[in-house]
Each structure stands twice: as C-alpha cells, then as structure tokens.
Image: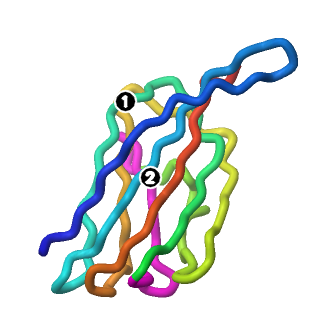
Amino acid sequence: MAGTITYTQNILDLGYYKKSITAIELLISWVGDASDGTVPELPIDEYSGWYITKIITKPGTPSPTTLYDITLIDADGLDMADGALLDRSATVVDPKVVLTEQIGKDGFTVTIANQAVHSAQGTIRMFLNRGE
C-alpha cells in the first residue's frame, strides 16, 4: 500500500487577559509506504500570513526510522523550520518552538525523508496564530 499523509484543522479560541485570540492546530498524520517506507509530500497552500508557533512530532506504531527528517519547504525552497525538525526521535514525543516564521502567500510543503520503516506511522501537531 502506498504511503499517505493528510491533515485536519482545529480552530482554537484562546482566552488571553481579556482578549480572545484565535489559533489553528493542524494535525498532520502520515503512514509510510508498505514496501519502502516512503511518505508523499503534503502541500499546504492555506494560512498565508499566519505564524508557525509550535510543532510537536509524535512517532506511532510501527515506529519510524531513527533520526528521520521533517521539513517545511516554502516557495523559495527554504525550510521554514530552519532544520529544527531534522533527526526526529523514533520513540519520544518531541516539541519544537518556532516563533518567527510567517507563512507566505504560496504556503509550504511538508516533507518526510530518511524514513524507511515499512508502514511506519507518526503525527505532526502544528500550531499557528496571527501574531496578534
């Protein structure tokens, strides 16, 4: 079976000192290919102007390859996470804070590389806000 990668969106209303702040949580779920473990790319072309504030990666079962890599490639071919999502753990939930990257008008593409475990699974929780 071919690898898959999909995402869902949750709108979060965060109360913050007499002010309501809307944030978005993207839950990205992936499964490696049954024959070679590869995962397709996932273009996300929404959320222009939003900021990526936090990312949490969680390996599933079966566990992915130790030190697999995730990148968030923008329209210029640059990793919006600036390498912070490289060398992911195959066994531990791993949070990363990314406070400075604003999503451009062309969005970004999620890529998973160096993952060779057949049918491995994982999730990426990405939190976005407007920078208000």
Q: Which mark is residue 72?
A: 2
Q: Quadrant of residue 105?
A: top left
Our reading of the magenta stretch's main secondary structure is loop
Q: Amino acid at mark 2?
A: Leu
Q: Amino acid at mark 1?
A: Glu
| Image location (x, y in percent) of residue 1 | 12, 75
Q: Which residues are magenta?
A: 62-77
Please tell me how crowded label 2 is: few (under 14), some (14-19), or many (20+) other residues with Cα within 10 Å: many
Q: Which mark is residue 7?
A: none
Q: Kindly identify the residue that appears in the image at 21 percent across and 85 percent down.
A: 36
The answer to if 64 sits in the magenta stretch is yes
Foreground residue, 76 or 125? 125
Quadrant of image for the C terminus: top right
Q: Kindly identify the residue that appears in the image at 57 percent across and 82 percent down.
A: 91
The answer to if 61 sits in the magenta stretch is no
16 relative to 114 in the view: left or right: right
Question: Vertical placement of 20 versus 42: above or below?
Answer: above
Q: Kindly identify the residue that appears in the image at 65 percent across and 41 percent down.
A: 53
Question: Vertical placement of 103 versus 70: above or below?
Answer: above
97 relative to 45 in the view: left or right: right
Question: Vertical placement of 86 versus 8: above or below?
Answer: below
Question: At numbered mark 1, what does the secondary structure look like: helix, strand or loop?
Answer: loop
Looking at marks 2 and 1 on the same chain, the residue that comes earlier in the sequence is marked by 1
Q: Which mark is residue 46?
A: 1
| Image location (x, y in percent) of residue 35 | 16, 85
77 relative to 86 in the view: left or right: left
